[in-house]
Amino acid sequence: MLLADAVFMAVASFARRRPERRYRATPLGAAGEDEEVGRLAYPMVLVQIPMYNEREVYKLSIGAACGLSWPSDRVIVQVLDDSTDPTVKDLVELECKCWGNRGKNVKYEVRNTRKGYKAGALKEGMLRDYVQQCDFVAVFDADFQPEPDFLMRTIPYLVRNSQIALVQAHWEFVNPNECLMTRIQKMTLEYHFKVEQEAGSSTFAFFGFNGTAGVWRISALEEAGGWEDRTTVEDMDLAVRAGLKGWKFVYVADVKVKSELPSNLKTYRRQQHRWTCGAANLFRKTGAEILLTKEVPFWWKFYLFYSFFFVRKIVAHVVPFMLYCVVIPLSVLIPEVTVPAWGVVYIPTAITLLHAVRNTRFHACLHVELVNIYILLPESQMGIL
């Protein structure tokens, strides 16, 4: 199953059509548009930045959001501060006021409780009165820094194509060479974006929202039920519910947003645990709904249920864990337990090659992946341990 799914995604990502060839994405206000369209060329956009004690990066994220190339009267920057450190809250509020004094429309929002964590903050932010005038919402985590042309390059997909609900950008990293852990993370996430997200976008117009560096159509977000905190992967939860309503997603690899990779083991393990267990829990909650819905075609449901959830979120974690942590150790300790060569060498090597071939640093990626297979515990198991 893992090999077949890896082959499918590799072929789909290689044979992809660029999103601008599949959808209309001409720049807003382009020459030739009539006067009425020109006046409506720049819709109202809400930019949400959820924060929690972000002393080191709050200036960078707020500054990047306020520096977006978009008419200042057509964008609202909403800083959702859940910080528990009073000093950090004061610093963030002061930064918002400084940008407000420069003519930017910045809203500083706080809550009395942290119920729902990030999902709760985003959900409460959407309830503000001024959000009603916005058509689209861009979400950036506190350590993400979009380029000034981010909205100019993503919003046209939503404006020109009424069936699209989400435009997801590519993550670019500011600290990939900080240590071995960050280098491995970069290669893993490069595969996720260049293969998994690309394949889902080009074949079924569906993939899991990455929780940041993306723009949503607010009407689609509301139709899907808005943000929910029933799992630790609120972003994937929203994407699944929107997909079940028939909305399409597009991944734009050429639009890159700078971010920071976790560089210590504790943070990394917490992140992997949240992603791994949250996805499995979401599958448990939505599996029946996926099978029973009649709003999407059969093959779309099959892709979502089998490939996206069962193979990648369940099998991809459980099988390697059982193989490398149970079966192979038993085969060493108990002579009667044997593992065929194709299960230990050939299939893992083939999957590794498929994972590595789309990486810009192919040989380094291949070396690290082979080390993971034959020496180290696969990184996907960090979420299980």
Image: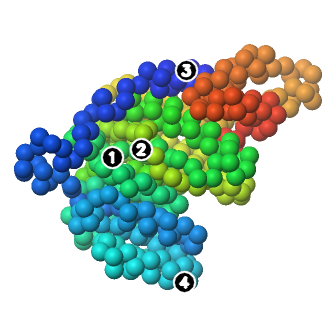
Determine the image quadrant of residue 134: bottom left
Instruction: Name which of mark 3 and mark 1 comes first in the sequence.
Output: 3
Picture quarter with the N terminus: top right
- Contact? badges 1 and 2 (CB < 8 Å): yes
Q: Which residue is drawn at 44% across and 67% down?
A: 62
Circle 4: residue type: Pro
Q: Which of 285 and 189 is in front in this view?
A: 189
Please tell me whether mark 4 sits on a helix, a strand or a loop: helix
Q: Residue 154 carries which label?
A: 1
Q: Which of 263 and 114 is in front in this view?
A: 263
x then y, percent, for residue 335:
93, 22
The answer to whether residue 163 is left or right of residue 357 is: left
Q: Nearer the viewer, residue 165 or 15?
A: 15
Q: Which mark is residue 267?
A: none
CA gap, disc 3 and disc 2? 26 Å
CA gap, disc 2 and disc 4? 35 Å
Q: Residue 255 carries which label?
A: 2
CA gap, disc 3 and disc 1? 30 Å
The label nearer to you, 1 versus 4, is 1
Residue at image mark 4: 86
- Near mark 1 (Cα within 10 A), the count class, few <14, some 14-19 or many ≥20, is many
- Contact? badges 4 and 3 (CB < 8 Å): no
The label nearer to you, 2 versus 4, is 2
Instruction: Name which of mark 2 and mark 4 comes first in the sequence.
Output: 4
Residue at image mark 3: 7
Q: Which residue is drawn at 84% across and 19% down?
A: 338
